[in-house]
Image (cartoon, rainbow, N blue to C red):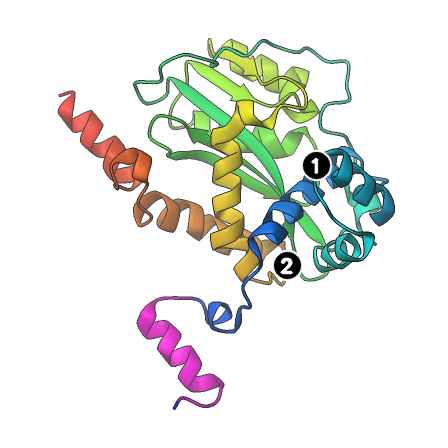
Amino acid sequence: MLKGEYPVRLLCEILDCAPSSYYYRSIREDDLLIREEIEKIAMEFPRYGYRRVTAELRRRGYRVNHKRVLRIMHEENLIVHVKSYLKTTLSNHHLGRYPNLVKGIQIVRPNQVWCGDITYIKLKKEHAYLSVLMDIFTRSIRGWQISASLDEELTISALMKALSRDVPEIHHSDQGVQYASRRYIQILQERGVKISMSSKGNPLQNAYAERLIRTLKEEEVYLNEYEDIEEAKEKIGHFLEEVYMKKRVHSALGYLTPWEFEHNWREGKR
């Protein structure tokens, strides 16, 4: 029998997995859903305490009590630090809004539609935010950025990284102020990109991005405790660019990785 920390680390190196995954206590499936919803509520209503968050969860159909919500908010650092970091709501703004251009269309080629989303990342003593852009057809990550601030620079930085590689025909997102900012819209329009947004309060219209975020949370974020933002960038970047892109197979892609699927598609078009 293996005893002590050294054999555990050695075994994890052999199996190519993080030591934290050995000690990790699995999270109940319904806890995962509630964690995700609490993060969304905290971003949309930054001044809500746990009682208001509990009430909002119940309004959204979740059967929870305030003790459970308080526990999760403590675990996710959403009690003390949230007020000083969350500066904007998701969609409470007077900037431009755009129709949903992807509803019902057939997505049949790379860079036909990109989707974007923002999510909260828990750190050991604070928290940060991740902005990510994904190509829907190939499920390939086009750009990402992590920042301590939830502002337009977060999404613009991820967008500029993505545009340095490719340009989409359509950019789809929620109606968040970061995606509706004048600078963000201008960058897209200057490159001839059509802008699409899901309806307010309808996350299913941005389901591909939501699914990507959930995969990231379940397979990387919830398995680790990041010391600081630099460690989060390193580990999340590795997951997105190496694990998600090159190792993790997708049933929707015929059980290929995004990199393999896109490579094969382009080779077949030559």
Residue 161 shows in the view:
no
As drawn, 129 above or below 169: below
Q: Residues within 10 Å of mark 1 (few under 14, many from 20)?
A: few
Q: State yes or no: residue 245 in magenta.
A: no
Residue at position x 63%, y 44% in the image: 36
In front: 23, or 16?
Answer: 23
Kindly identify the amino acid type of the residue bearing the numbered disc 1: Gly
The residue depicted at 43 percent of the width and 51 percent of the height is 239
Residue under the image location 37 percent in, 51 percent down: 243
Kindly state the secondary structure of the residue where label 1 is placed: loop
Residue on which disc 2 sits:
228
Percent position (x, y) of residue 238? 43, 52
For the magenta stretch, what is the residue range? 2-17
In the rendered image, residue 214, in percent from the top left (x then y), is placed at 52, 43
Circle on res. 61: 1
**Mark 2: which secondary structure?**
loop
